[in-house]
Amino acid sequence: IHERNKKHESTTAKVCFEFLDKTGRSFSSVVKELHPELLLPVCVFYLILRGLDTIEDDTSIPLETKEPPLRDFKDYLEQDGWTFTGNRPEEKDRQLLVQFDNVIAEFRNMKPVYQAIIKDITDKVGNGMADFARKAAFGDAGVNTVEEYDLYCWYVAGVVGEGLTRLFVGAGLGEVTLINHFHLYKSMGLLLQKNNIIRDVREDHDDGRRFWPKEIWSKHVDKFEDLFEPENLELALNCSSEMVLNALGHASDCLSYLVGLREQSVFNFCAIPQSMAMATLELCFRNPAVFERNIKITKGDAFQLMVESSQDLEKVYKVFCRYVHRIQQKNNPKDPNFLKISIACEQIERFA
Ligand code: PS7
Ligand code: MN
Ligand code: MN
Ligand code: MN
Ligand code: MN
Ligand code: MN
């Protein structure tokens, strides 16, 4: 519906949109469809967070080298020409940071209100990532309790939800009262992040990283590595289903959040990733492949979800119910969380 005005676009903005395509994964298409008022601000916001994440994810950078750029990232936003070349050559989004001066130029071109929101969020996300990189490097390898798990997800995704909500409201495209609904925008971020952490468990483990909280996996296996042993498959599936149960706790909040969005492009931007997350959670639910490789919903399913989620809340609710129903069908009576999973599913279905 909205067409980008490419003629009046600066070279640095063009470079930003190219990086959005190269690094955007599932987000690039929904960002590009946003209302013109938020198109470039959200694109730049995305690239800034992608830049931070490219430092956070690089396991070849030792803590002493990694912590300062994560904590100081917000200051670089005001340093014309700043770039970062400290990533290993194989890091897939390395080039974004090598040419980060383009992102900074567009950041400094934005309305000051948007700059202030993005700078504040960059500060919180960068420091949260640094805190957890420090926890992972020392002591007990990071995420132990469910509370710590939620805190990590809050820093890397919940805070992003806060920032996006402030941008929507600042642009006059979301209900002002959404800002007060901390719990709802937190859930918007946490459902996406938990889904990512469940799906990526094998890839993260191979990289020497663990985000599944010990409080959950220790109920099923003695050592985290045991989840990946074929002889422990049944225990591993029960563990992953408890992780899915934990994530499902955010689904109703996400539907409630969407009620506060009036502008269609903002609605689609928020709804499409949540529908994809519900589909991915269902795909991961009691699926042995999770412990072997990275699984993905099919292109066809993704396309259908985009169409269905670009309409109204009723349609998104139906999508949620479809996947919740499939989870119910795969739920196993021998699973220690069988009843809790069943109740969590019914609770989502009762949203309407
Ligand atoms: C600003 C659009 C809509 C209220 C880069 C969007 C990694 C799951 O495993 O690339 O590294 O490949 O699939 C997005 C709330 C955040 C949370 C978070 C910023 C939704 C850096 C996104 C996206 C709030 C930290 C995708 C949470 O990761 O992972 C903008 C409302 C970035 C949102 C990370 C993860 C996003 C994520 P991987 P992905
Ligand atoms: Mn991804
Ligand atoms: Mn990361
Ligand atoms: Mn990442
Ligand atoms: Mn991941
Ligand atoms: Mn990934």
Image (spheres, grey):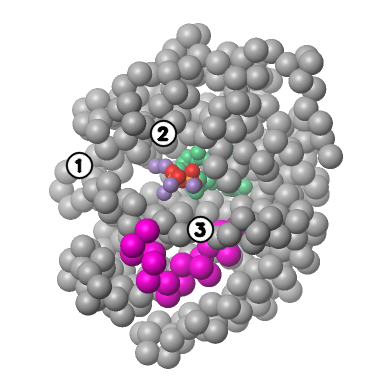
Question: Is residue 112 found left or right of 87 in the rendered image?
Answer: right
Among the two numbered marks 3 and 1 on one chain, the one whose residue lies closer to the N terminus: 1
Please give the residue where the numbered disc 2 appears in the rendered image.
92
Q: Residues within 10 Å of mark 1 (few under 14, many from 20)?
A: few
Q: Nearer the viewer, residue 154 or 294?
A: 294
Q: Indicate the amino acid at tag 3.
A: Lys
Label 3 – label 2 distance at C-alpha: 19 Å
Question: Is residue 221 found left or right of 330 in the rendered image?
Answer: left
Please give the residue where the numbered disc 3 appears in the rendered image.
296
Q: Nearer the viewer, mark 1 or mark 2?
A: 2
Q: Residues within 10 Å of mark 3 (few under 14, many from 20)?
A: some
Q: Nearer the viewer, mark 3 or mark 1?
A: 3
Q: Residue at x 80, y 47 (%)?
A: 264
Q: Residue at x 77, y 35 (%)?
A: 35
Q: Is residue 162 visible?
A: no
Q: Magenta stretch: give its range.
A: 276-293
Question: Is residue 29 found left or right of 223 in the rendered image?
Answer: right
Q: Quadrant of the N terminus?
A: top right
Q: Residues within 10 Å of mark 2 (few under 14, many from 20)?
A: few
Dot 3 lies on which element?
loop
Residue 137, label in figure? 1
Q: Nearer the viewer, residue 22 or 240?
A: 22
Say whether mark 1 is within 8 Å of ligand 3. no
Label 1 – label 2 distance at C-alpha: 23 Å
Among the two numbered marks 1 and 2 on one chain, the one whose residue lies closer to the N terminus: 2
Say whether mark 3 is within 8 Å of ligand 2. no
Q: Indicate the amino acid at tag 1.
A: Ala
Dot 1 lies on which element?
helix
Residue 120, label in figure? none
How far across and down, in percent of the image, does residue 205 sit?
28, 53
Q: Are marks 1 and 2 in contact (CB under 8 Å)?
A: no
